[in-house]
Amino acid sequence: MKFDKNMLALYAITDRKCIGDRGLEYSVEQALSGGATMIQLRDKEVDFDTLCKEADSLLKICQKYSAPLIINDNADVVIKTGADGVHLGQNDMELAKAREILGKDKIIGGSARTIELAKKAEQSGADYIGSGAVFGTLTKADAKYLGTENLKKICGAVGIPVVAIGGVSADNIPQLENCGISGVAVVSAIFGADNICSAAQKLRKLADSVIYGG
Ligand SMILES: Cc1ncc(COP(=O)(O)OP(=O)(O)O)c(N)n1
Ligand SMILES: Cc1ncsc1CCOP(=O)(O)O
C-alpha cells in the first residue's frame, strides 16, 4: 500500500491487556469502524507463528477499511504475511536495513524522541516518526516523558510526518494544536475504552481538528 500521511490521523495500536477477553479481531474492527486510520499490531507476548496468524486475520479486516496494518518490531512478519509495514524502535532492526529488505513499497515507521534520532530516521528511509511519550504513559514501562515543546521541535526538524504517542486521550489532544503533528498514535484511550468504537470516533474528530483545523 502506498504511504500517505493522512493515514496517520488516528493510529490505533493494539494491546493484549487493554483488549482483555474482547478479542483482537473484534476490537480492531471496532476501532476501524470508529475511524481509526491505521492499525499497529503490537503483541510482545507471542511467538513468531502466532504473530503471523494474528497479522493474517487483522489484514483481512484492515483491507475492508482500506487501512494499513503495521507490525511492531518485526519485519519478518511483514515479509511472511504481506502486512503493509513495520514500526521499529531504537532497539530493533536498523531502519536502513528494514528498507533494504522490505523495499520501497512497504511503510516503515521509526521511534525518535530527539531531533538527532528523528533526522537519522528520516535519512535511513523512514516514512514517518512516532515521538513520545508526549504526555507520559502507563502502557509502556520504559517510555520517557517528552512533552509538547520537544515534540514541536522534532516536527519542525524533519520533512517526514510525525505522530504523537504516549498518554494521548480526548482530554489532551487539543494541547497538540500547533505542534505540527500529522496524527496521534493511541493504545489505552482506544483499546482500554468500554466502547472502542465510540472512543475512536471521538478521538478521530479531535485529531482531525488539530491536524486539519476546524
Ligand atoms: C507509532 C509508534 N511510535 C512509537 C512506538 C514505540 O516503539 P518502540 O520504541 O519500538 O517501543 P515498543 O512499541 O516496541 O515498545 C510505537 N510502537 N509506535
Ligand atoms: C508504545 C509506546 N511508545 C511510547 S509511549 C507508548 C505507549 C502508548 O500507550 P498509551 O496510548 O496507552 O499511553
Image (cartoon, grey):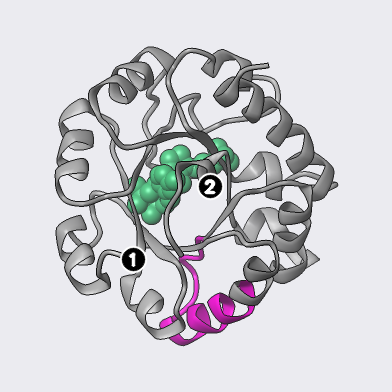
- Whole-percent x and y of residue 47? 44, 80
**146 w.r.t. 38: above or below:** above
What amino acid is at disc 2? Met
**Is residue 76 visible to the viewer in this orientation of the structure?**
yes
Q: Residue at x 75, y 62 (%)?
A: 29
Residue 7's disc is 2
Q: Is residue 172 left or right of residue 146?
A: right
Give the CA distance from mark 2 to mark 1: 15 Å
Q: Residue 101: x percent and y percent? A: 21, 73
**Amino acid carrying mark 1 in the image:** Asp
| Residue located at (64% from left, 29% from top) | 208
Q: Is residue 125 above or below residue 145?
A: below
Q: Residues within 10 Å of mark 1 (few under 14, many from 20)?
A: few
Quarter of the figure that contains the C terminus: top right
Q: Is residue 173 left or right of residue 185?
A: right
Numbered range of the magenta stretch:
41-58
Residue occupying image coordinates x 29% and y 24%: 154
Q: What residue is shown with label 1?
A: 105
Q: Establish whether ligand 1 lies closer than 8 Å to the Cβ of label 1.
A: no
User: Could you say whether the residue bearing mark 1 is in a helix, strand or loop?
Assistant: loop
Left/right of residue 201 with respect to residue 107 in the rendered view: right
Comparing 32 with 199, the one in front is 32
